[in-house]
Amino acid sequence: MVTNMNRLLLTGLIGAAVTAVCCFTSLLPGALGMVGLGAVARHFDHVLLPALAGFLGLTVYALLGQKRTDDSGCCRGAQSHQGEEKR
């Protein structure tokens, strides 16, 4: 079952990977240079670095959300066991 947090995590990881590849390698400027759009490459840092930060933030948010839902499920079970011991 795919939850919203799993989708957010997957989106964050894939987005961060693609952005990092385009940002830290010459893949994107080289491809644009082949089609004559190499002059646009000087503006990539203004777009790719904030996008990378956003995708990494989304990944952290999804990981913390998953941990929070895992912890709440664990604690509910522990509380029900404590109530049974008192009876």
Image (cartoon, rainbow, N blue to C red):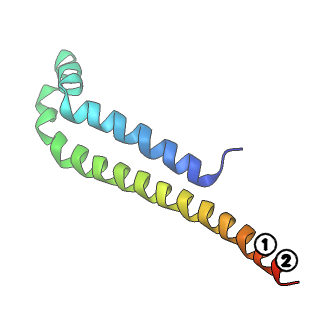
Q: Residue 14 location in percent, x, y? A: 43, 37
Which amino acid, by three-letter code, is at mark 1? His
Residue extending farthest top: 34
Front residue of this view, candidates 29 and 3:
3
Residue 57 vertical placement versus 49 (above, below): below
In the figure, is residue 12 to the left or right of 29? right
Residue extending farthest right: 87
Q: Residues within 10 Å of mark 2 (few under 14, many from 20)?
A: few
In the figure, is residue 18 to the left or right of 26? right
Q: Residue 43 location in percent, x, y? A: 14, 42
Q: Quadrant of the N terminus?
A: top right
Residue at x 49% of width, y 55% of height: 62
Q: Secondary structure at mark 2?
A: helix
Residue 12 vertical placement versus 74 (above, below): above
Residue at x 22% of width, y 36% of height: 23
Which amino acid, by three-letter code, is at mark 2? Glu
**Residue named by callout 2:** 84
Front residue of this view, candidates 50 and 36:
50
**Residue named by callout 1:** 81
Give the alpha-carbon distance from disc 1 to disc 2, as whole Å: 5 Å
Marks 1 and 2 close (CB-CB < 8 Å):
yes
